[in-house]
Image (tube, rainbow, N blue to C red):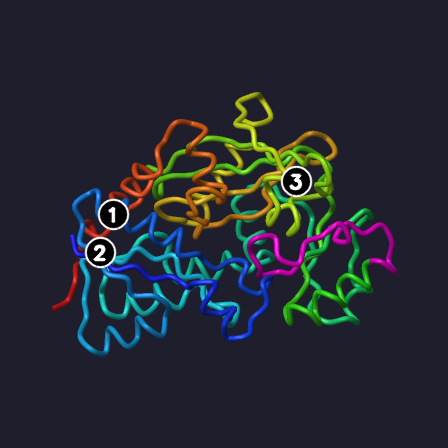
Amino acid sequence: MRIGMTFDLKDEYLAAGFSAEEVAELDSPVTVEAIRQALVSQGHVVEAIGSVKSLVRGLVDGHRWDLVFNIAEGMHGLGREAQVPALLDAWGIPYTFSGPEILALTLHKGWTNAVVCAHGVPTADFWIVSAPETVEEVDLPFPLFVKPVAEGSSKGISAKSLVRSRKELREVCAHVLETYRQPALVETYLPGREFTVGLLGSGKSSRVLGVMEVLSVADGDRSAYTYANKQEWRQRVRYSVVGDEKALQAADVALAAWQALGCLDAGRVDVRLDGQGRARFIEVNPLAGLNPESSDLPILCHHIGLEYDMLIAQIVESAAQRAKVRGLGARQ
């Protein structure tokens, strides 16, 4: 196939004046090249497209592809991850991973919680704070956990995210509202073990690849998988593939959430145990990082013996099968 690749490179945005935290979700040339090599090794012809603006120019100029491998996160707005797939839908070009409606929903952690709750998937009790004065309306028992409602890569999560008083809640919510210019998600704190669950496939054919426990070590923050832990994972975090009873419960919760949301092809669901040892959905990442060395999904796949090239191949196969069923193809 002729496959295009959409992506956002950290270096380009850093050069434009964005901070390291602002571009934390974006990709490095290492990731783009690893995916390109995997696709080429499978016999595909690969064209690097780049960001949504480059995609717009390409479409207007008449460029078309049999499939687009999309890892573009976008930079602006709560619908930033949905921009590329929405454009590709308009042109009838198939692509990997979930569509615009799913990516727009799941970027907003509060809305995602509401949807999975409606499908019977257990979450922490939660509250959305959209303005400083609404902090007083939060009616949940302390301790609580506060984070931006629509960020990835643990952005906005630190040791201060765990709050034990109304005063701390006001301060952290105010910080989130001012710094990230979006609502704060306030949740009942889950003190138990934390897992990230790899998923492959779509709908009823989706399956759990494995369950990886995230363990803080050395100077790592133990309250959560914080931004600092994520960025310095070699020093702060240890990953362990697990299959005990609690891990299997986490897998069940993750698969139920993945299917309830309608996520496609591959991704991750994060799960944590509550004070009674029950698995609770935290969040879903339907556009999971694919850095072969540092992203959670490839790390998990390495631990279970699924080589990186095979992961990419299975993602493409899943997307191609969906496109075939829908009768989609490149428009000349």
- C-alpha span from label 2 to label 1: 7 Å
Q: Are marks 2 and 1 in contact (CB under 8 Å)?
A: yes
Disc 2 and disc 3: Cα gap in Å? 36 Å
- The residue carrying pointer 3 sits among few (fewer than 14), some (14 to 19) or many (20 or more) residues within 10 Å by Cα, namely some
Answer with left or right where residue 308 lies relative to residue 293: left
N-terminal of the two: label 2 or label 1?
1
Q: Is residue 15 above or below residue 115?
A: below
Callout 2 amino acid: Val
Q: Nearer the viewer, residue 11 or 205?
A: 11
Q: Earlier in the sequence, mark 1 or mark 3?
A: 1
Disc sitting over residue 51 in the figure = none
Q: Earlier in the sequence, mark 2 or mark 3?
A: 2
Element under disc 3:
helix
Tell me where residue 184 appears, x and y as whole percent. 68, 62
Q: Quadrant of residue 199?
A: top left
- Taking the spot 30% from the left edge, 59% from the top edge, the residue there is 5
Q: Report helix, strand or loop for mark 2.
A: strand
Query: Could you say where residue 79 lies in the image, as x and y percent from the top left?
Result: 47, 68
Assess disc 2: are there few (<14), some (14-19) or many (≥20) residues with their C-alpha within 10 Å of its C-alpha.
Answer: many
Judge whether residue 157 is colored magenta.
yes
Up the image or down, 158 lies above or below 49; here it is above
Q: Which mark is residue 46?
A: 2
Q: Amino acid at mark 3?
A: Arg
Which residue carries the number 1 mark?
39
54 relative position to 219: left or right = left
Q: Where residue 118 sits: x, y (%)?
A: 55, 49
CB contact under 8 Å: marks 1 and 3: no
Magenta stretch: includes residue 96? no
**Residue underneath mark 3:** 236
Q: Residue at x 34, y 41 (%)?
A: 201
Instruction: Find the magenta span and give its range.
Output: 148-168
Q: What element does badge 1 sit on?
A: helix
